[in-house]
Amino acid sequence: DNAASGTPEALMVNAGNGAVTFDGSVGPGANGAIGGLTVNGSGATSLGAVKAASLATNTGTTTLNGNITTTAGQTYNGAVLLGSGVALNTTNNAVDFKSTVDNATSSTPEATGLPCRKSACPSARRSACPK
């Protein structure tokens, strides 16, 4: 957040072949959510909770270990592993999976109320997802 203007700042991480890990929360501070979060590279990405204007991962497998909350869309261009109890929240925008979605635990992945796109939807929910 740009404290002087109150405008949330975007964060772009270009990791090349390296892994990206955010163990803690991104954007939950006293000043609110950050601008868009974009992660680029061919390595794996691991995210804790995120509060941002938008989220795009352009990486290998992305593991989500915390709730993801955006005011705009979420795009996951690589495979996604959902941690236990993770919720994907957005304000009237799509959550777009460009590859496979699976669970990192034994529970069934859920994206209740979210538009799920393409055949990457979890097999248990595929019948409810547009192609």
Image: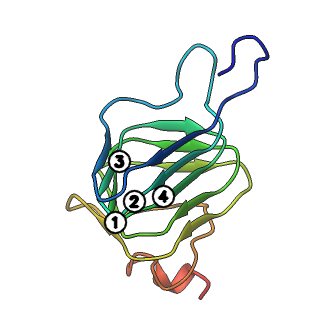
Of labels 3 and 2, the one closer to you:
2
Residue type at tag 4: Thr
Whether residue 16 sits left or right of residue 32 in the image: it is left
Number of other residues with Cα within 10 Å of mark 4, as a class: few under 14, some 14 to 19, many 20 or more:
many
Q: Which mark is residue 57?
A: 4
Q: Residues within 10 Å of mark 3 (few under 14, many from 20)?
A: some
Residue at image point 39% right, 59% down: 41
- Which quarter of the rendering shows the C terminus? bottom right
Query: Where residue 13 sits in the image (x, y, percent)?
Result: 46, 45
What residue is at 40 percent from the left and 62 percent from the top?
59
Name the secondary structure under disc 4. Answer: strand
Which residue corresponds to mark 2?
41
Q: What is the spatial separation of the Cα atoms under label 1 and label 4, in whole angstroms?
A: 9 Å
Q: Residue furthest front?
A: 16
Numbered mark located on residue 18 in the image: none
Tell me where residue 74 sits by quadrant: bottom right
Label 2, secondary structure: give it: loop
| Residue placed under numbered mark 3 in the picture | 85
Q: CA distance from mark 3 to mark 2?
A: 27 Å
Q: Amino acid at mark 1?
A: Gly
Residue under circle 1? 60
Question: Do labels 1 and 2 touch, CB within 8 Å?
Answer: yes
Q: Earlier in the sequence, mark 3 or mark 1?
A: 1
Which quadrant is the N terminus positioned in? Answer: top right
